[in-house]
Image (cartoon, rainbow, N blue to C red):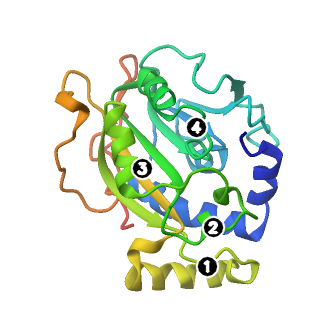
Amino acid sequence: MRTDALEIDRFYRSARGRAAREMALRRLTALWPQADGLDMLGYGFAGAYLEPYRAQARRTVAYMPAAQGAVGWPKGAPSLTALGEEARLPFKEAMFDRVVLAHALEEAEDLRRLLRELWRVTAPEGRIVVIAAHRAGMWARSESTPFGHGRPFSKRQLSDLLTGALFEPVAWARALYAPPWRWACGPKTASGFESAGERVAPAFGGLILAEAIKHVGAVRPGGTAERVRRSVLEGAARPALSPRSKPPSHPAAKDPAP
């Protein structure tokens, strides 16, 4: 049973939720600094992570599985939210250039089926980012937050899932080093924990982020992926475009440092 969307929404309006969003967005926007002319999908409860791209992207959709329920997004504007079956998305094949998964895999009934369905709607050379509770982090042990429900993931577990669904993992990062206590999640305090954690204990962030690419016609036997040398969540110089998309008319911005 998935955590109710209203409960997740309340979490993101709290100090702990704001800290989680900001720390994860630091990594996500370093990876994808722009989305001009792209079609973007958020799956699970991902509206909080789509917001920076809403004015840039050609299309943004926040898809929420029925077992979770839905909360309208964005606030105070026409809804871009869709509600439907967990692993049967009402979208055409190869429709989205970028896909963000948040509160998506931890409580899914059938992980492999869900990822194959997301593969179907992702454009050739399209990119997905998974934002999930990290098995080694403190937030996975806190049941008072949505990250403490369902299954957390290690890097190896996520890598196996993604390659098994014919995605190629290419970049990894961790975020949210502040402990899941209210006093530790104020803006300045959380930023201090983040800076210290990245230097002292980089493997123990509360969230793990994985970027993967859909390669068409380049699947290797057994679904294994070759090692790709990239900086942590380094942005790609050339965005993936769906077949009907046109490249941005201006040069891509340089990626900020993570």
Question: Which quarter of the figure is the N terminus placed in?
Answer: top right
Q: Alpha carbon of mark 3 to alpha carbon of mark 1: how far?
A: 23 Å
Say whether marks 1 and 4 touch (CB < 8 Å). Answer: no
Give the numbered dot on residue 237: none
Say whether marks 3 and 4 touch (CB < 8 Å). Answer: no
Q: Which residue is mark 3?
A: 32
Q: Earlier in the sequence, mark 2 or mark 3?
A: 3
Give the numbered dot on residue 190: 1
Look at discs 3 and 1 and give the one toward the viewer.
1
Q: Is residue 204 left or right of residue 150?
A: left
Residue at 36% in and 28% down: 241
Question: Which quarter of the figure is the C terminus placed in?
Answer: bottom left
The answer to which of 62 and 118 lies nearer the viewer is 118
Q: Alpha carbon of mark 4 to alpha carbon of mark 2: how far?
A: 25 Å
Q: Which residue is mark 2?
A: 141
Q: Earlier in the sequence, mark 3 or mark 4?
A: 3
Q: Alpha carbon of mark 2 to alpha carbon of mark 3: how far?
A: 29 Å
Residue at 45% in and 38% down: 36
Q: Secondary structure at mark 3?
A: loop
Q: Which residue is mark 4?
A: 42
